Amino acid sequence: MNNLNDPPRWNIQPDPRGRGAGDGNQWNYALLVPMLGLAAFRWIWTRESQREIEKVKSQYAQDVSIIKSEMEAKYQETLTERRRAAATLELELERERQRVEGYKQALISQSQRLMAERKQLQKERESLEEEKQRQIKSGAAGTVLHRALERENDWFKRATSTLKELEGQLVERQNAYCSITRPRAQRLEMERNMLLKVVKEPIGGELDLESDLNDIFKRDNYCADLLNMDKRKNGSLMWVYLKYWQLQVTVQKHKRAEEAILGGKIQPK
């Protein structure tokens, strides 16, 4: 049996070399130092990482705030520009609307004036025709008037031919005006050619065609619908002028015959 007062060697005995219990703790210190270092390193690393994270978050928030502010400023600037542009367009549209309305009123007034003049010319034509018939029935005077009118037939045919040619040119010019594919320069060239022609023609000065053509070029903006294939459906004021010119030619024929008779150019046989 074991003697508790004299235990065997397997019992805990004091260190026979006299080193005491301190040597046993050397291993514990050897393990404790790296662990403390590792713990300190982890604490420092965690703290620095947290600081870097906070720094990145702060920088990110600042960048987002700056970008947001810049985007809001650009949005407000763009919105202001769009509003300003919209206001300018509305103002221009109103000006164009007023100008179109002015042209419309002027065209209506011009058409009414031309219609009144046409009616007056029609009355004069009818009066001249009645005078012609009366003169014809009166014998010799009728013969003189008939000869005077025949004398003016060549002038009348040339004038009518000129108006017919001018009508075709006006139809082509108006078709160019209404076309979305033909260049504007081509139409302007056609207008210049027409003005040069009427200036050279004697009838142009007698009927004041140059002034009337400029009025047509300035005011006649009527076009048929886009699907229209008939060129003669374009234009409005030009057709009024063409009828007006034809009436003027007829009246001029009778006036020229009357002047020839009164001037003694036509003598009764």
Image (cartoon, rainbow, N blue to C red):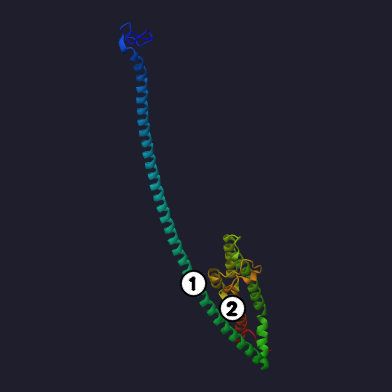
What is the secondary structure assignment of the residue under circle 2? helix
What element does badge 1 sit on? Answer: helix
Residue 93 x %, y %: 47, 65
Q: Residue at x 67, y 86 (%)?
A: 146
Q: Amino acid at mark 2?
A: Tyr
Is residue 66 or residue 74 the one in the foreground? 66
- Percent position of residue 129, x then y: 64, 87
Residue type highlighted by circle 1: Glu
Q: Residue at x 40, y 43 (%)?
A: 64
**Residue furthest to the front:** 1
Quadrant in the picture for the N terminus: top left
- Judge whether residue 141 can be spotted in this image: no
- Give how far across and how far down residue 160 sits, in percent: 65, 76
Residue 77, placed above or below residue 64: below
- Select label 2 or label 1 by which is in front: 1
Q: Quadrant of the C terminus?
A: bottom right
Q: Which residue is mark 2?
A: 244
Q: Residue furthest bottom?
A: 138
Give the spatial CA distance, label 2 vs label 1. Answer: 25 Å
Q: Residue furthest top?
A: 17
Please name the residue that numbered disc 1 is placed on: 101
Percent position of residue 166, x then y: 62, 71
Q: Earlier in the sequence, mark 2 or mark 1?
A: 1
